[in-house]
Every structure is written in structure tokens, then in C-alpha cells.
Image: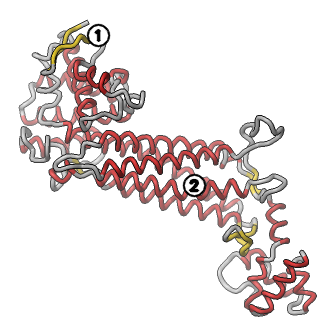
């Protein structure tokens, strides 16, 4: 054990760990989720810290020997090392101070080790004086959230684009499979299964655009604003250099916010990101519901789609198989919607020069992106790639439907169409048979009007 102290007193710290006294206090104070801070967030914070060291070296404020050791320590974390040294709960009081100091302690203790010194020798390399030089939790924490969101967002967008690509492939593959369209859960007019697949792709592509736009807006950071955005204890040149250094470290362009006080006390950019995730989840839910209903049956439902069989569906009913992959994506989206509410409440709960609720915002946004990415990948791999259409069932519903009478309306008028629809409903006879019996159209005219391509494209079916 080694002894470390802060202004509240002294604690014993296991000598084999790189975190210190302030991390121990956080472990004791915040036993909320039973989880640790997201590893991507740890690496994002390490990138922010590396950028601060580079900026402080450029102004001459950071001693070169200490700066080089801190950079090496940060690089190790960025590479995925020492991730077990961040045990603090992701939901914590203090606006993220516990996580910021956890990072500062790990960086400094590792830097001490690299320079041949013992852990805990904060008189040589200090978490506050060196690890936190020209910084505050109030600028490093939200900046690290933005770096992490952009990293995770790339993975989500990659998964969403893959989903869109596979839906568009199905759109092309199913372009000639005509089925009944439905409104109000009632028969409407025909549509192709391919058109439905392309409509899902279109809605999700719109979600991708929303998410990308929201992520683009969070490339403005308040680094150098320190405690309240005024820049106290940060040199003007540091403020200029730190955004440049962050851009170099991350490979993305980050710029200093025009008004760092605003950027320190407002978090509406996070509401934009969370809302984009929620809105995308909404269209995914609608798609999953359609898949589940089109696959319903197989004997007593629509059964227009055959989903891959992934597991037995019942502990009591032999042979039953459920649409579990669509169901789990639905539930994931519900969680994203719930997470958005937590983010919304956090965003509106800032006071004066700081929003202290950023930890819960970060926790929920990171989870939303992670959950969506995993569930979408599962949907593509375990459902969409092996999806099969039931062409015969689709055609059967077309043949039995009265909804196709709508295509006859321009040719025989609304009154006649309504009369034939009523008779078809009451007798159970096909529309074609009723129309021929009434002598309103010839067989050739009916075949032309009710041709699949004619009924599923713009214009008046059967009219040259």
C-alpha cells in the first residue's frame, strides 16, 4: 500500500494500481450502475489529455521531461492499455470531476513510473498541477464526450449504411413481387415488396443524415475555457493551440467555440445527437413491426415473408418459431427512446455557468449508440441476409383482395367500383369475376388494368 492525500485527508491506495486518492473517494461515493466508464470514453479522454500536454509544451509552460512522459502514458491508454485502471461509475456527481481526476492520476502515476519514480510522488508529477494544467473538468469532460460520440457515431453510421445497402438489395431482388398494400391495417392498393424494402432504406438513410448532421455540430469545443468559460489559468496561445492539437491527435477537425462561456454552460448539442438517435430508432421500430406482421402466421397470419429460424419460440408449444431478431431490435430502440428522455432532462437542468448533469448524458448517449450498433448488426446478419419472400402468399392475397378495385375507378367510375367492391365482399368472389359478369370491361382490358406493373407505378393503370 501507499499513502496518498488530498485536502480532505489521507487514504491508503494499493501500490499496484495507477489511480489514486480521488478515484478511491469516487469508488466509495458513487455505487450506482455497477458499471465502469465506457472504454471508448477513457480513450477519448486520453486523447484530450494528450492534446493539452502538446499545447502546454508548445507554450513552454509544461516541463519537457514531464510532458514527454505524460504523452507516452496517454498513448498507452489510447492503444488500449491500462483500461482496467478506470473503475469509477459512469453516473457520478461533480460534473465528471471524478473521471477527470481518475485520468489525471493514472497518467501521472504511469508517467512517474516511466521516469523511474514511485507512484504517488505527486511532488514530482502532479495530477492537478501537470495532468490538469490549463484545464478544468468543465472543459475536458464535455470535450471528451464529443470525441467519444464522434468515434462511436462512425461505427453506428457504418452499421446503418450496411442496413440500408441490404434493404436496397432486397428492393431490387423483390421488385417484381406484387403484394397488397395496407392502410389502417386494411386492404389498400397493390405495392411491390421491393418498393416496401426501398421505403425502409429511404427512411433509415434519412436517419443517417440526421445523426451525421448532429455529430458535425459537436466539433466545436470549449477547451481552454477552464472553469466557467472565461479562460482563467489558460494562456491565450494555449487556447489557440489546444484545438489544433486535438485535431492532430484525433484525426478530426475540432475548433474553439466562438463563445466558450456558452459552450461551457449549454449542452444542447448533446440533445441534438440524442434526438437524432431517437428519431432513427422510431423509423427502425416501424420497419421491425412491418417485418413481424408480414411474417405472421405461418398458417393464420399474412406470411408474406419467411424469416430465418433462429431458435425455438416456446417452452410449451412445439414447433413455434418467433421473430426474435426483429423483436430485440424493437426493444433496443425502446431503450434508446428512454435514454433520450434522460439526456433531455440532463440538458435542461444546467444552472448558471455549468451543466453538472453531463455524466448521465454521456452514459445514455454512449449506451444508445452501442446498443443500436449491436442490434442493427444482428438484424442484418441474423435476419435480413437470409430473408425470403413468400411469393405465392403475396399473390394469394392479391387475388383475394377487393382493394384492387381502386385501379378500375378511372375506367368505370366511383359508383360502379363501389358497387362491385361491395358485391365482392359479400359474396367472397374475386373482383375480376364480378367485373366480367357486369360486362363493364373485357377480359383483355381487365388484364391490362390489373397488371402488376400498372398498379404499382404512377399514372392511370391500363391507360396508354
Report the number of numbered marks: 2
Identify which residue is drawn at 16% across, 48% down. 353
**Could you tell me which residue is drawn at 19 percent across and 52 percent down?**
257
Whether label 2 touches label 1, CB < 8 Å: no
User: Callout 2: few (<14), some (14-19), or many (20+) C-alpha neighbours within 10 Å?
Assistant: many
Q: Which mark is residue 285?
A: 2
Task: Give residue 199's position: percent from left, percent from top.
Answer: 59, 65
Q: Quadrant of the C terminus?
A: bottom right
Q: Mark 1 points at which residue?
A: 14
Query: Where in the figure is residue 182, as x and y percent of width and height?
Result: 70, 69
Q: Please, is residue 46 above or below residue 341 in the view?
A: above
- Locate residue 237: give its quadrant: top left
Please tell me how crowded label 1 is: few (under 14), some (14-19), or many (20+) other residues with Cα within 10 Å.
few
**Number of the label disc, if any, that sits on residue 69:** none
- Dot 2 falls on a residue whose secondary structure is helix
Residue under the image location 65 percent in, 44 percent down: 325
Amino acid at each position: 500500500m501507499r499513502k496518498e492525500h488530498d485536502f480532505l485527508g489521507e487514504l491508503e491506495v494499493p501500490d499496484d494500481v495507477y489511480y489514486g486518492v480521488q478515484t478511491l473517494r469516487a469508488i466509495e461515493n458513487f455505487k450506482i450502475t455497477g458499471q465502469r466508464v465506457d472504454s471508448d470514453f477513457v480513450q477519448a479522454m486520453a486523447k484530450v489529455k494528450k492534446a493539452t500536454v502538446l499545447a502546454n509544451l508548445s507554450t513552454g509552460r509544461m516541463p519537457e521531461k514531464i510532458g514527454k512522459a505524460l504523452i507516452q502514458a496517454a498513448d498507452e491508454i489510447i492503444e488500449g492499455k491500462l483500461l482496467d485502471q478506470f473503475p469509477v461509475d459512469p453516473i457520478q456527481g461533480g460534473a465528471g470531476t471524478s473521471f477527470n481526476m481518475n485520468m489525471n492520476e493514472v497518467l501521472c502515476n504511469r508517467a512517474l513510473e516511466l521516469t523511474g519514480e514511485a507512484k504517488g510522488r505527486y511532488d514530482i508529477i502532479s495530477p492537478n498541477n501537470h495532468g490538469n494544467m490549463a484545464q478544468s473538468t468543465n472543459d475536458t469532460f464535455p470535450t471528451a464526450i464529443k470525441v467519444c460520440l464522434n468515434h462511436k457515431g462512425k461505427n453506428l453510421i457504418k452499421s446503418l449504411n450496411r442496413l440500408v445497402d441490404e434493404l436496397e438489395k432486397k428492393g431490387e431482388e423483390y421488385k417484381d413481387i406484387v403484394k397488397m398494400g395496407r392502410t389502417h391495417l386494411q386492404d389498400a392498393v397493390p405495392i411491390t415488396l421491393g418498393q416496401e424494402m426501398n421505403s425502409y432504406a429511404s427512411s433509415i438513410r434519412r436517419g443517417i443524415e440526421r445523426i451525421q448532421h448532429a455529430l458535425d455540430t459537436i466539433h466545436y469545443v470549449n477547451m481552454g475555457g477552464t472553469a466557467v468559460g472565461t479562460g482563467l489559468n489558460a494562456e491565450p496561445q494555449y487556447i489557440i493551440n489546444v484545438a489544433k492539437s486535438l485535431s492532430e491527435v484525433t484525426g478530426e477537425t475540432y475548433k474553439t467555440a466562438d463563445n466558450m462561456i456558452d459552450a461551457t454552460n449549454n449542452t444542447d448539442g448533446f440533445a441534438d445527437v440524442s434526438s437524432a438517435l431517437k428519431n432513427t430508432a422510431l423509423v427502425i421500430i416501424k420497419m421491425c413491426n412491418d417485418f413481424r406482421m408480414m411474417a405472421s402466421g405461418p398458417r393464420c397470419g399474412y406470411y408474406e415473408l419467411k424469416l430465418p429460424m433462429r431458435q425455438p419460440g416456446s417452452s410449451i408449444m412445439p414447433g413455434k418459431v418467433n421473430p426474435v431478431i426483429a423483436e430485440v431490435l424493437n426493444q433496443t430502440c425502446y431503450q434508446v427512446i428512454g435514454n433520450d428522455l434522460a439526456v433531455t432532462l440532463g440538458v435542461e437542468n444546467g444552472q448558471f455557468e455549468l451543466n453538472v448533469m453531463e455524466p448521465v448524458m454521456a452514459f445514455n448517449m454512449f449506451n444508445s449508440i452501442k446498443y443500436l450498433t449491436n442490434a442493427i448488426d444482428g438484424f442484418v446478419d441474423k435476419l435480413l441476409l437470409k430473408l425470403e419472400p413468400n411469393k405465392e402468399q403475396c399473390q394469394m392475397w392479391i387475388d383475394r383482395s377487393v382493394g384492387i378495385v381502386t385501379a378500375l375507378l378511372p375506367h368505370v367510375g366511383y359508383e360502379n367500383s363501389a358497387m362491385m367492391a361491395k358485391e365482392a365482399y359479400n359474396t367472397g368472389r374475386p373482383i375480376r369475376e364480378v367485373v366480367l359478369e357486369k360486362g363493364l370491361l373485357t377480359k383483355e382490358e381487365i388484364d391490362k388494368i390489373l397488371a402488376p406493373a400498372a398498379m404499382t407505378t404512377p399514372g392511370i393503370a391500363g391507360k396508354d
